[in-house]
Image (spheres, rainbow, N blue to C red):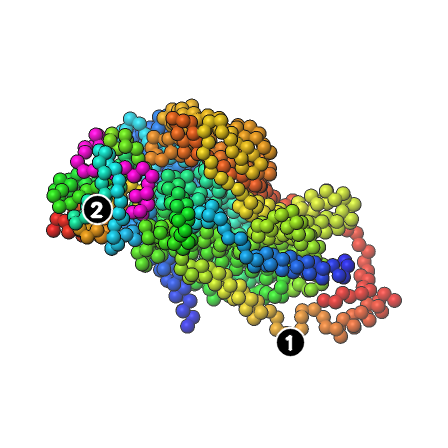
Amino acid sequence: MIPSIGHASILVGLGLTVYAAAAYLLAARGGDPRLAVSGRRAVIGSFVAVAIGCFAMVISLVSHDFSVRYVAENNASTTPPFISAISLWAALEGSILFWALLATGWASLVLHRYRDRYRQLMPWVGATLATVNAFFFAVMTWPGNPFALTSPVAAQGSGPNALLQNHPFMALHPPLLYLGYTGLAVPFAFGIAALATKRLDEEWLRIVRRWTLIPWTFLTLGIVAGAWWSYEVLGWGGYWAWDPVENAALLPWLTATAFVHSAMVAERRGGLKIWTSALVIATFVLTLVGTFLTRSGVVASVHSFTQSAIGPWFLAGILVALVGSLTLLVWRLPELIGGGRPSGTVSRESAFMLNNVLFLGLTFAVLFGTLLPLFIAATSGDTISVGAPWFNTVTVPIFVALLFLMGVGPALPWGTASWGTTRERFTVPLVLAVLAVAAALGVGLRDASSLVTMGLAVFVGGIMVDEVMRGARVRARTRGEDPATATWRLATRNRRRYGGYAVHLGVLVMAVSVAISSGLASDRTVTLAPGETSTIGAYEIRHDRLVVEPLASDERVIETRAEVTYSGPQNGSLGTALRDYPNSPTAIATPAVRTSLAEDLYVTLLASDTATGTVTLHLFVNPLVVWIWIGGAIVGVAAVFAIWPERKARSVTVEQPQRAPSVTSVEGA
Amino acid sequence: MRHLRWLLVPIIVVPLALLLLSGFGRDPREIASPLIGQPAPTWTFTTLDGDTLSTDELAGRPYLVNFWASWCIPACVDEHPVLASAFERHGDELTVVGVLYQDSPADAEAFLARYGDAGYGHLIDESGRLAIDYGVTGPPETFFVDADGIVRARQWGPLTDALVDERLASIGIGR
Amino acid sequence: MKAWLPAVALGGALALVAMVLVFAVQPEPAPTAAERTDALAGELRCPDCQGLSVADSPTRSAQEISRQIDVLVADGATDDEVRAYFVARYGDWILLAPTSPAAWIIPFAVVIAGAGALGAWLIARRRPAHQPKRGISTEERRRVREEAEALDA
């Protein structure tokens, strides 16, 4: 019964979104405005429908209803309820269902919020969002039915993928990531609307910037959560492997970030209409390409599902979206050209444009590296790999250049920078950076990338602190506030700028942590009999005993666990294990991580001998890793701060005597 | 001249479409084998039955080397009868050699007891050296070597009756 | 701000860069066998993982490849010979980075071309030199000053 309700809700959702798209389209082309109202209700209805569908799936999972094929493939009677519930997004069909929930949620939110405004844009926005959502409902109706039944009904299911059961982050990473992905359809819809109505103006830029930043925040948190999860779960001691699906999440993030920056230039002086609308389109198309790469089985990856009928559907979706939006853009091209002239060659504006060149360069590089094996296989039949060594070599210099720009850009004036200004703003931070690097060299740090990043971090951080202090000082002086209040009041009244600084601060923290954790990490592999010890870094590790037993939470899983005591900067005991899941041929590593602010002690069990109790352990000391996650959190909080609506300015009446202002000197222009 | 800008659409869309389309129908995990056309690796190993087998003994006759494991389900289960049938039909002119891939002899024996032992030998590749020498990324993989000791074909993934006949033809069996 | 500070800062930065270059150019001591093995293991792909290097991977096949690298290095093989050994068995796929120089040059070329195009665009589109900057000329400035002083008086 429940699966039928679920299936029916998808069909209802399909009908509603198709209707909404048609209604909105008619309304957009000069029809009855009540059509728009009807369309909006249909979109909200589709959200309710898919919510019911998700609810039905969760119930089926938690109640272990193996008549549903998705449940039989991803659940077992021994699966704990929490894991059952989050298995909604564990595999292909369920994840599309979840995606549709979030996508219709965003659409409903945006269409409802702006129902009384932007009357020319909103019908097009609604039509676009409804069409995109209709696509996902169509995929769920035909090639990827989550409620497909299986008969005969198996007595026991396969159970969830072993990797997905190991860690609570499985509950966090996909929802955050999907909120980001699905949310990026909103700025795309506004982009289509603006191109269709020829209203690419300042107002459009403001809306699209806001509705890019909101999903961007989720996407950032989702990517960081994914990195954290793979670090805690996969056992190789790293957090980013340039896996195709990781890259797929990064690509729209890069273009969205580029857009947010060029939008500021466009807002300031006009122009850049083609560039900004192209970025908005590219971001959305890249979310589709990303989800295609994950779901089509066309590239091999940790995440990828095997090839199924869904792949071609997604490819068709990408091509339709791309052809449609490109055609619209090219059609409007003559009207979009021009507007606004760039100011000086060295200015904040040119720094932002260079930022865009670099971000787009990164996007190209990551896309190139991800698709090159596919290209080579298609053209010559050879198989090659493009892995971490290539990606690191190619992207790190670009990231370093971006880091430098991040400091320099906001400190440059919008107009042409004079030598005097530059000297004044950059000298002290430069001095501090030089001193910091010299100190590091003196202390014995020789790793080139760590030194460069540290120097840049001090330089950039110094400029930022200087910027904030300047403003706070002026405000404190003129209003008699103490520095702390002045800074806070300044920040809350200029959320965009100070939120931006705080986001950059978070990025800085992450950049330094990434550089130092990769450059200064140490590891070794040791084989220990019970009672033997080894050292790594400042730690002494002692292997106590080897334990083999079923998991308390799921008795079908056999855990082989090395119990270890460690002493050093941190003291305690840990268990690092290999788990044998019934549906997985190889044992799954469950590393133990002991985190402190300075470093992580990370231990993976590689092999064990149950007869002697001897274990082979891979030991790591990874410095500053926790600061990567802290930096990510700072970026998230800062982004929320930046997006949060400012209090409307209060109007103040000032009594002024009527006389001509006194002018005693005129500043040179 | 104004209409030249429309070329932008196919210029961007067509290459992307072709590239992404090309991925369908191919398994991205399957890698091209550099052994094809090259002399097959030489080895000496102990079989499950306790005998020793080496490539010297196989010289002069075509043979196939099949990497499998008891945990490789359902692929190795599916191709097991295909190999048994090939051995039965061509056993007088073809040598069939199985190799355990990251598997224990006990589990392998249990597999054979359950799914049938066709009678050909299975090498115990304890350390995994043989798998590396053949460039195996995961079971099942099968290499077809002709009478001169040159690798002529490689099947990545499970064999089917049709596929095995095709591969055997490349080493001169069953024509 | 002291006039000499910028010069000192710039000088200090350049000195640091020079030091780093000197360090980089100095011949490093020849890597030990263990270091070579680690480096090579980082370049080779683990056959039954998803994109991890042999150095990072816990699987049996990765450990066996690692052992094999040890043996080869101990027998006196050069780095290139070790790579060729595995490429002969797995093909170019076993190398985590493509060997073709084009694969490395293309991304940098694109970025440099983009930056170059941006520079050209900025220079071409900035206000031409013969047009006065928006604002007032020196002559007008003098007149305004005179008028203003007259007002104040």
Q: Which residue type carries mark 1?
A: His
- Between A487 and A430, the one lying in front of the other is A430
The part of the chain drawn in magenta is B112-135
Which quadrant is the C terminus of chain A positioned in? Answer: bottom right
At x 55%, y 62%, the residue is A271
Q: Position of residue A299 (x, y in %)?
A: 36, 49
Q: Residues within 10 Å of mark 2 (few under 14, many from 20)?
A: few
> Does residue C110 appear left or right of residue A483 in this picture?
left
Circle 1 crowding by C-alpha within 10 Å: few under 14, some 14–19, many from 20:
few
Chain containing mark 1: C
Is residue B104 among what the camera can see? Answer: yes
Looking at the image, how many numbered discs can be counted on the residues? 2
Q: Inspect the magenta stretch and tell me whether residue A383 lies in it.
A: no
* Magenta-drawn stretch contains B120: yes
Choose between A36 and A571: the one closer to the eye. Answer: A571
| Residue C151 to residue A129: above or below | below
Q: Residue at x 55, y 28 (%)?
A: A572
Indicate which label's residue lies in the foreground, 1 or 2. 2
Q: Is residue A125 above or below residue C5?
A: above
The residue beneath circle 1 is C130
Q: What residue sits right under mark 2 in the picture? A: B56
Residue at 59%, 65% in the rendered image: A342
Spot the residue most to the bottom: C130
Which residue is at 54% across, 47% downward? Answer: A519
- Image mark 2: chain: B
State the image coordinates of residue A479 (x, y, percent, origin top left): 77, 47
Of all residues, the one furthest to the right in this rendering is C153
Q: Which residue is most to the front?
A: C75
Looking at this view, is A338 or A608 the one in front?
A: A608
